[in-house]
Structure formats: C-alpha cells, structure tokens
C-alpha cells in the first residue's frame, strides 16, 4: 500500500485539477526547511509542479531564495503566523498559485510557532477548488525536545497532538538514549500518530518513509478551539536586513563572520534565558554563494552551510525567534552584535528597517571609510 502510494505521488498520473497540500510543521529549528528542500527537489525531478509557501514570524523572509529552483516556485508570508494572524494572506496566496502556477503539490512550511492542524482547518473552509491533503507532519529535534516540553509545555503539546505523522529528525547526530526518551514522550502525547525517525539532512532510507507516508491521504481530525500561536508560544521575534557595500573578500571570511556573530548572539541571549530554544538564522549573500548559519538553542554550536549561487546584491539577513526573552532586549542583542561584528570586519553596510510594509534604508559607514574620505 505504501509503495503504491509513493508511486502515485511521483508518477505524474494525478488529476491536475486536484491540488495536493502538504503541511510540514515543527518548532523553531526542527529542520523543516531542510526536509522541504529535499522533498520538493524529488517532486520536481519527477515532473511535479511544486509550490512552497514559507511563513516567517519576522518581517523579512530568509529561506525563499534557497528553496527556489527549476520547476519550483516559492512564496514568502512574513510578519505573523498563517494559523492565526495571516489567514487572509494565506488564502490569497493559495488562490494566486492555483490560478497562475497550477501546482500539482503545495508544500506549506509554517513558522515554527504555528499549529499545523489549525492551518489545515483554515484552508478547508477557504472555498478553494478541489484540494487533497497529505497527513499533517510535525518534526521534532530529539536533542531539544525535553527542553522544549519544559520551556513551553502546552504549546509543544498542541503541536504534537495535532500531527498525524511525528518525524524525529536529526537522527545523524542524536544520541540513542535521547531518541528513546523522545519516542516515549511522543507516544504518551499522541499515541495515534505514526512516528518516523530519519535525517532530513542526509536524506537516508528512513527519510524515504516520510515521502511514502506523504503520498497517503490525510485524515480530517475533529475541529479544535482556535488558538493564537504567537501569544501562547512566549516567543519574541525580530529580523533585520543589511546591504553590504564592501569588506567580505571570500566565502571563508564569510563563514568566520557567520560563526562569530551567531556565537555572540547565543552567549548574550543565554545571559537572559540560560535554557532558551528557538532559532537564530543568518544568511550572507556573496557574488558566487550564499552562506547560511543557524543556532537553535543555548547549548548548540552554530551550524554553517554553503550554497553555490550567483547573486547580484550582496546582503546580510538575520531572523531570530527566541523563547522567554523580551523583544526589546532581543532587538538590541541581535542588531548590536551584528553591527559590532560588521565594523570589526571593516564591512560597510546599509541597514534596512521594515516600517508599515516598506523597507526604509538607513545609512551606516565604517570608520575606515571615514578615514579614506
């Protein structure tokens, strides 16, 4: 049955009029983007017209550029959560995709503080043409799941209970005893969900099981009381964009900048909440590559990856969403850390701020440039 379902998903024999929706959720830093990137590429390679909707709680999107590729179109919804504050934007985006791109499959990556089951309920009452749903997925990082349950227990419980598939991700780095403890907790919270264990980063054989199960039809669950995920999550978020004018000479310098900046932000956030979880993502565009880095908890070292890609505009983007840190403090930490690092590196930059939907440019120059003038 499962292999047959996977064949149907990839065979290209599905009715074009029936747009299939996949919702892949999970708390901040659980690996959603990596999983969706791998799934979408396989679908595209199989000839499926695939659209991805990326939802970021911050004002600036960060992952859309890296998810775009031939046969795949990406839309970013920012400044809120599609399960509560951005429902109208979500409906408009789905209608536009349906009319202009006519995708076979739409993959939705909610912000890490969204409730995936609530998103499905909202889509079902939007009055769109024929839709079908894959099982709702919630990804879990076993290395942080115990901390997540302690930091925001009701929130994590809701995410887990709404899932039809619970994906224990990052199996390539998770200790066996932590995985067993995670499995036990997940089974207690949602005994009806199917639990899958894999590494989205490696795309291992177990990850293929996820693709097989996504080909099956999702099961409509009883309607739940609507919740505002932003309020319940106790997460503060802030994003910022800098245009880079000069200073970064090669990818290795970029890697060092990303790592140093993330370490500084992590250590300063730990002074306020020693057990913080969430996600700090940092992306630097250079002429021939994108360097992406992230840190997802107080005890994690920064993770950095290189993506070969030609870029006309050189820029630095940061998205942060952290538990139990006042937003005013988070803004001060991320912006002062980045700008101090930029100046130390001799990089001239312009900061852009989101104000009422418009990016406003704020000039900034380094001391080095002042001396040259």
Image: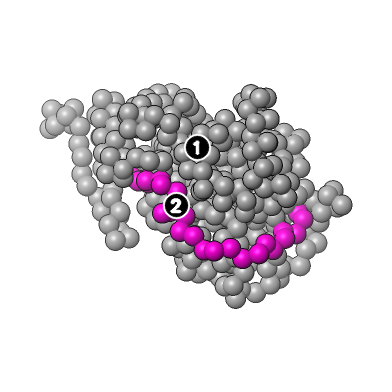
- Toward which corner of the image does residue 258 lie, by quadrant? top left
**For residue 103, what is the image quadrant?**
bottom right
Numbered label attached to residue 150: 1
Specify whether residue 85 is painted magenta.
Answer: no
Per the rendered image, the range of residues in magenta is 215-240
Q: What residue appears at the point 40 percent right and 23 percent down from the top-left corner?
A: 256
Label placed on residue 357: none
Identify the mark at residue 232; answer none if there is no mark. 2
> In the image, is residue 184 above or below residue 86?
above
Please tell me whether residue 225 belongs to the stretch shown in magenta. Answer: yes
Whether residue 345 is situated above or below residue 16 in the rendered picture:
above
Q: Is residue 13 above or below residue 43?
A: below
Q: Residue 154 at x, y = what percent?
A: 51, 48
Near mark 1 (Cα within 10 A), the count class, few <14, some 14-19 or many ≥20, is few
207 displayed left or right of 287: right
Between discs 2 and 1, the one toward the N terminus: 1
Q: Are marks 2 and 1 in contact (CB under 8 Å)?
A: no
Comparing 285 with 341, the one in front is 341
Position of residue 139 in the picture relative to residue 149 (left or right): right
- Dot 2: within a 10 Å radius of its alpha carbon, few (fewer than 14), some, or many (20 or more) residues? few
Q: Secondary structure at mark 1?
A: helix
Q: Nearer the viewer, residue 142 or 44?
A: 142
């Amino acid at each position: 049955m499962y292999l047959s379902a996977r064949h149907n998903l990839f065979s290209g024999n599905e009715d074009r009029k029936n747009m299939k929706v996949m919702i892949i959720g999970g708390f901040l830093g659980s690996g959603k983007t990596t999983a969706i990137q791998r799934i979408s590429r396989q679908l595209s390679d199989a000839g499926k017209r695939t659209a991805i909707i990326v939802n970021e709680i911050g004002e600036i999107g960060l992952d859309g550029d890296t998810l775009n590729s031939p046969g795949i179109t990406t839309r970013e919804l920012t400044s809120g959560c599609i399960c509560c504050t951005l429902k109208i934007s979500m409906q408009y985006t789905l209608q536009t995709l349906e009319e202009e791109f006519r995708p076979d499959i739409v993959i939705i990556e909610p912000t890490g503080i969204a409730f995936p089951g609530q998103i499905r309920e909202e889509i079902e009452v939007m009055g769109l043409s024929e839709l079908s749903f894959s099982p709702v997925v919630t990804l879990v990082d076993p290395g942080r799941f115990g901390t997540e349950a302690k930091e925001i227990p009701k929130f994590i419980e809701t995410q887990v209970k709404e899932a039809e598939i619970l994906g224990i991700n990052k199996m390539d780095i998770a200790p066996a005893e932590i995985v067993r403890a995670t499995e036990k907790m997940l089974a207690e919270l949602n005994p009806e969900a199917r639990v899958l264990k894999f590494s989205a980063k490696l795309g291992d054989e177990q990850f293929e099981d996820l693709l097989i199960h996504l080909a099956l039809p999702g099961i409509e669950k009883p309607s739940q009381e609507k919740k505002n995920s932003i309020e319940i999550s106790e997460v503060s978020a802030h994003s910022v964009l800098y245009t880079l004018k000069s200073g970064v000479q090669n990818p290795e310098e970029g890697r060092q900048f990303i790592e140093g900046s993330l370490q500084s932000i992590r250590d300063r956030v730990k002074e306020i909440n020693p057990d913080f979880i969430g996600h700090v993502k940092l992306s630097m565009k250079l002429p021939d590559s994108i360097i992406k880095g992230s840190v997802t908890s107080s005890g994690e070292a920064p993770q950095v990856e290189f993506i070969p890609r030609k870029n006309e505009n050189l820029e630095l983007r940061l998205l942060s969403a952290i538990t139990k840190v006042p937003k005013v403090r988070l803004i001060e930490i991320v912006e002062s850390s980045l700008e101090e690092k930029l100046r130390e590196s001799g990089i001239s930059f312009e900061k852009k701020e989101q104000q009422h939907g418009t990016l406003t440019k704020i000039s900034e120059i380094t001391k080095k440039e002042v001396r040259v003038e």
